Amino acid sequence: MMAGQWYNAMDYSMLKMRQENNKKTEAYSRITINTLSYKDRIAKAIVKEFGENANIIPPFTCDYGCNVKVGNNTVINHSGVFLDTNEINIGKHALIGPKSGLYGAIHPFDVEARNEGIEKAKTINIGDGAWLGGKVTVVPGVSIGKHSVIGAGSVVTKDIPDDVVAVGNPCRVIRKITEDDKINPIRKK
């Protein structure tokens, strides 16, 4: 799985890992305002690394959890779906929009192999300070550079460099982030 080689996702040990993680993500997704104090504790039990002041807004789903690293001060908005069959690394101060999917799994084109549960996976990396708008899809093996902005509804099929705005299906860089973009009218000078 982690080596990027084909493996059997229907293997008993794989099924058991997913079932155990499903129990955790289902509990997390049932969190209400009355149980918020438990949210971070449950999130830390789901993912491999959960940074300081990070926030995963329920509902949230992932396959295994043990391959997800969430950096400090990162926010994953509601209805995130992570197929973490390989590592999903999210840097610090990143924003993941609602209903976004980070999909590390690769399924074979051959129907018989698919029916047998054969798949492989690649790592996904989201850089520090990156912002993915709502309903962004990131496919296996993609890295999104630090401080880059991905427009809502984009399908990211190739690496995105640092400090750019990229949009579309397939997602393409439309421009660099400039000094004018870095102006914050509320920040004290």
Image (spheres, rainbow, N blue to C red):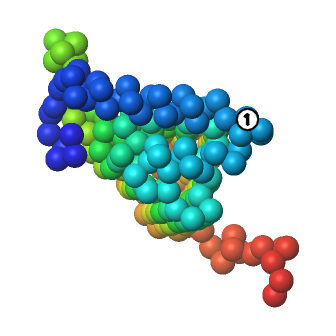
Residue in the image at 63% along x and 45% along y: 39
Residue 36 lies in quadrant: top right
Q: Residues within 10 Å of mark 1 (few under 14, many from 20)?
A: few
Residue in the image at 22% along x and 28% along y: 13
Question: What residue did someone put label 1 on?
Answer: 32
Residue 169 location (% of width, % of height)? 49, 37
Residue in the image at 62% along x and 62% along y: 53
- Please tell me which residue lies in front, 189 or 31: 31
Residue 120 location (% of width, % of height)? 22, 35
Q: Could you tell me the amino acid type at mark 1? A: Thr
Q: Is residue 151 visible?
A: no
Q: Is residue 59 left or right of residue 11?
A: right
Residue 75 location (% of width, % of height)? 62, 53
Residue 165 lies in quadrant: bottom right
**SS under mark 1:** loop
10 to 1, vertically: above or below: above
